[in-house]
């Protein structure tokens, strides 16, 4: 499905340009090589896509209450999105933008669920910092992400930078050096994926206008 250029793309591009200007040439090359590694891994062809059945799951929200995907689907379609962590500026920009669009999702009877591999305390901090009113779920060990096929292993060079910069292992409670793609799915009430955004580049995200367009067709 084509991705419309919109406001979120513009905000992310500003962040991308700022990052390029901020980092050394060597560091930028490490990140570029990291994206290339994800792309060449075959993850984009293996991840669940449009027409696939979304696996059910139950995860705890930031208040330690269990949330079930299929129970949410009883109330309407679900927008399921992954973010890498509160340490990621691209994630925070996207989460805030999704919060702005939340009333439009609700008008279309949709529920927004955001998954992160971060420990619950860290995901709670992210939710509070960004004043999120949608559900954030801790996918510890990326177990659900792996069921959807959206989890990859960082290159050693990128993992080393992340560990030195903000302590990725402590954030996630493990030393797996694995992260999810910034994937987004729209799932209908029958549990079938109607829209899938998958990119090897963590700086690219699903444009909410595309999500809203799909949700409109489901109503």
Image (cartoon, rainbow, N blue to C red):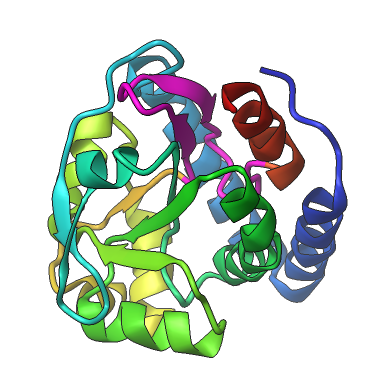
Q: Position of residue 27 (x, y in %)?
A: 60, 63
- Please provide the residue range marked out in magenta: 182-206
Classify 118 as above or below 1. Answer: below
Classify 173 as above or below 149. Answer: below
Q: Quadrant of the C terminus?
A: top right
Foreground of the two, 132 or 19: 132
Q: Main secondary structure of the magenta part?
A: loop
Figure quadrant of residue 177: bottom left
Is residue 200 one of those drawn in magenta? yes
Classify 205 as above or below 56. Answer: below
Q: Residue at x 37, y 25 (%)?
A: 43
Q: Quadrant of the N terminus?
A: top right
Q: Residue at x 22, y 78 (%)?
A: 120
- Answer with left or right where residue 6 lies relative to residue 197: right
- Answer with left or right where residue 96 lies relative to residue 4: left
Q: Residue at x 28, y 64 (%)?
A: 137
Q: Position of residue 12 (x, y in %)?
A: 75, 58
Foreground of the two, 43 or 27: 43
Classify 151 as above or below 112. Answer: above
Using the rendered image of the protein, determine whether residue 167 is visible from the camera's viewpoint.
Answer: no
Foreground of the two, 182 or 188: 188
Figure quadrant of residue 115: bottom left
Q: Position of residue 207 (x, y in %)?
A: 71, 43
Using the rendered image of the protein, determine whether residue 189 is visible from the camera's viewpoint.
Answer: yes
- Answer with left or right where residue 128 lies relative to residue 105: left
- Answer with left or right where residue 20 lies relative to residue 112: right
Q: In this view, which residue lies farthest toward the top? A: 51
Q: Residue at x 52, y 35 (%)?
A: 200
């Amino acid at each position: 499905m084509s991705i419309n250029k919109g406001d979120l793309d513009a905000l992310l591009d500003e962040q991308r340009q700022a990052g390029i200007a901020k980092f050394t040439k060597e560091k930028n090359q490490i990140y570029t090589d990291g994206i290339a590694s994800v792309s060449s891994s075959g993850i984009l062809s293996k991840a669940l896509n449009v027409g696939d059945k979304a696996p059910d799951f139950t995860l705890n929200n930031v208040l330690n209450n269990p949330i079930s995907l299929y129970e949410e689907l009883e109330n309407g379609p679900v927008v399921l999105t992954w973010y890498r962590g509160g340490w990621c500026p691209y994630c925070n920009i996207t989460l805030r933008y999704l919060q702005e669009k939340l009333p439009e999702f609700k008008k279309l009877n949709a529920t927004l669920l955001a998954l992160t591999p971060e420990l619950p305390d860290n995901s709670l901090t992210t939710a509070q910092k960004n004043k999120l009113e949608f559900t954030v779920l801790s996918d510890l060990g990326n177990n659900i992400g792996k069921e959807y096929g959206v989890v990859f292993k960082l290159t050693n060079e990128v993992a080393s930078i992340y560990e030195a910069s903000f302590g990725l292992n402590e954030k996630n409670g493990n030393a797996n050096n694995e992260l999810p793609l910034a994937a987004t799915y729209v799932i209908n009430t029958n549990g079938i994926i109607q829209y899938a955004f998958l990119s090897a580049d963590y700086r690219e995200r699903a444009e909410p206008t595309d999500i809203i367009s799909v949700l409109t067709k489901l109503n």
